[in-house]
Amino acid sequence: MSNQNISTSILIINFRNQRTYIKKMKSLKLRNTTWRSVFIFVLGLTSLSIYVYLQYERSTLSSHYYTNVNQQFCRIPNLNPWDPSISAYIKQTESGCPNVPPLMSVDDQGFLQFNDTSARHFGIKATDLLCTYAIVQRNGDNDVIFEEVKRIVFPVFVPGRVFRVQCKNKIDIVVYDFVHINVDYLEPLSDKMVTPEDNQTYSIFFVGIDSASRSHVLRNLPLTYAYLRDELHMYDFKGFMKVGINTFPNLCPLLTGKSESEFPFYLILMKLDSMPLLWKEKEFERYVTLYAEDRPEIALFNFHKRGFVDPPTSYYFRPVSLAMTKFTPVIVSPLPAVNSECYGNLHQYDIVLDFYRRFLEKFRSKLRFAFFWNNQLSHESYTSLWNGDLPLLQLFKSMKERGHLNNAIMIVYSDHGYRLGGLSTTYVGRLENNLPFLSVYIPESLKKRFSWIPTNLNQNAERLVTVYDIHKTISDISKNKFENLTDGNVYSQRTARNLLLPVPKERTCVDAGVPDEFCTCQTSIQINPSHFKMTLLGKHVVDFINKLLHKFSKYCQLLQLSKVTDARVIYKRKEQDLLDKFNVFIFGAEGDDTGRYTLTVETVPGLGLFEAVIVYDEIMESSDKMKNSISLIGNPSRINRYGNQSHCIDDKFLKQYCYCNSG
Ligand SMILES: *[C@@H]1O[C@H](CO)[C@@H](O)[C@H](O)[C@H]1NC(C)=O
Ligand SMILES: *[C@@H]1O[C@H](CO)[C@@H](O)[C@H](O)[C@H]1NC(C)=O
Ligand SMILES: *[C@@H]1O[C@H](CO)[C@@H](O)[C@H](O)[C@H]1NC(C)=O
Ligand SMILES: *[C@@H]1O[C@H](CO)[C@@H](O)[C@H](O)[C@H]1NC(C)=O
């Protein structure tokens, strides 16, 4: 209130100044009185407009005074993937697997074929070998068993989805030992009707890549990106924002429409069979389903989770990836054991992509729900994603050319950007982290049915959207709900929105379901990180972390602030108000420091880097005294790798903070 009065009086003074100025002008005896009147008129009009404008700005902004900054509508950052500040991190490393030709492979009819070309290369003959297969059976979600061993005469149709092939030569030496897949084997589906697609019911394809921000995709998957944009005419969402720190909190809402925290205990304590996953909804009963994910040790439903009793989908890749860990592959001579990149002579991503492609082919023109998630390409390193460009391009090309996309919706997406170390220690990298890739494919037949769909999607591609919206969109499409669902209001609680309908321009992080600490809607200004006030805030962050570690104080060392490495102000209370800004500009009045900051702090021992969002405020301590209040929004996030610094504790959340006593 008092602020308003002061500002108004300042403007009056200002008008007075103008009058004096005008008097001076008079004394100059301007000859042309018409010109003088025009001058006065224009000056008066300008002053009035500025005043009215500032009052207007004040009235629109003042409602945000002291309120949550995330209730302002979202300004999507326009990131340059080649921003000079991150050039040091834009590198590409080659990933290579042993260059050994395949001795056998499964053909498109499901027959295991012996490759005579390769055999000649190795100088061996099929007739000199004794080969057997053993079908792999799932044994719970973390183990597989091998059935009895059977003799092979090539070519052979093995009646199992996954099997191990072993060959010995005449002197009983193992010259071949490998896991193979036969997607054509139908058994578990035999009594299930698989319904054909048509132009009113759509197959649903998800292609997900871990840790790939939109910028990262633009930098590293240029061929794939261009193909999605130019050939598949997909919609490239620039305001797709993450809603949780890592993979599970982002994919959980995508698959269930709910946040991880809405599933209190059972997620951790129980098997996940009862989790209401999207493809388990009634509408998908007619679909043949697939879930394919690599890297079994960090898989979505198994990393710190207990997996499923029954396979969650009719085609489930996990037994394949588990079987690959059971023995060392041999192609004539032993190959390295399976690692995060390769299985024998093959890239892990090629194996999963092949599984996916063969599945699509097997059930061509049938209703399919296929969920692909790749951990390998980008999870470990921010320089490796480009290795996926050609394989992904080939997948999408074959999907189009083979007609799989005629009656299908496809979502190509990621969970978040690169999170730990390297790029993510820069400001631009941290923004990228919050803005994963999302691209949506809509078949021509659907665009024809509802001509408003392309218009809305083009518009929504520039707006704030999240995984909650993807869930809602796919769920609505599966129920054939297309019309009269429009709701243009912005709410003060999470609201899932169908991406085919208009998403409000005024959408806020609250409405979108983005927690405060990941809300990347406001521009920020860099400030001097060594300013004593930033040190004060930095100490507060470290105290906060030490409190979190309290229950492990026996194991983890007390952290200390080494330095604040980066500080940014998202808004200052004073700077937010244009009228005040104007006053500061005119009178040089001192602004205060209250507002919202993002800080990167380095701690010792261990040189951990943490990012935190802090609200620095003044609150009334008593009727005449103000007190500083510092509070953190969410928890600080570790942004560099902690390796085995926290080997002494097993707490998934606290591991990022702990530096073990024993070093
Ligand atoms: C057989 O192996 C050769 C390389 O030795 C390879 O070029 C060819 O594609 C393989 N054939 C099949 C059917 O996998
Ligand atoms: C959908 O399919 C039906 C029958 O196959 C055809 O008559 C109709 O034109 C198709 N609609 C669109 C939008 O392609
Ligand atoms: C949608 O609403 C319009 C008018 O508001 C109406 O004419 C149309 O029949 C409705 N469509 C459906 C599918 O309910
Ligand atoms: C883990 O810690 C031990 C010491 O406890 C050290 O020797 C080893 O190199 C560390 N490994 C990694 C991967 O950092």
Image (cartoon, rainbow, N blue to C red):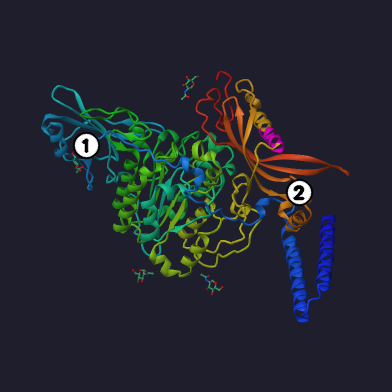
SS at mark 2?
loop
Q: Residue furthest right?
A: 624
Magenta residues span: 532-541
Give the left or right position of residue 511, taking residue 149 as reference: right
How crowded pointer 2 is (Cα within 10 Å; few <14, some 14-19, many 20+) is rated as some
Q: Amino acid at mark 2?
A: Gly
Front-lying residue, 44 or 313? 44
Q: Amino acid at mark 1?
A: Pro
Give the left or right position of residue 164, taking residue 204 as reference: left
Front-lying residue, 486 or 74? 74
- Asked whether mark 1 and ligand 1 are closer than 8 Å, the reply comes as yes
Q: Quadrant of the C terminus?
A: top right
SS at mark 1?
loop
608 is higher (above) or lower (below) than 185: above
Residue 424 in percent (x, y) is at 52, 40
Give the left or right position of residue 491, taking residue 123 as reference: right
Q: Read off the residue under disc 1.
A: 101
116 is higher (above) or lower (below) than 215: above
Q: Return the disc, 1 or 2, that comes first in the chain's sequence.
A: 1
Ligand 2 quadrant assignment:
bottom left
Image mark for residue 591: 2
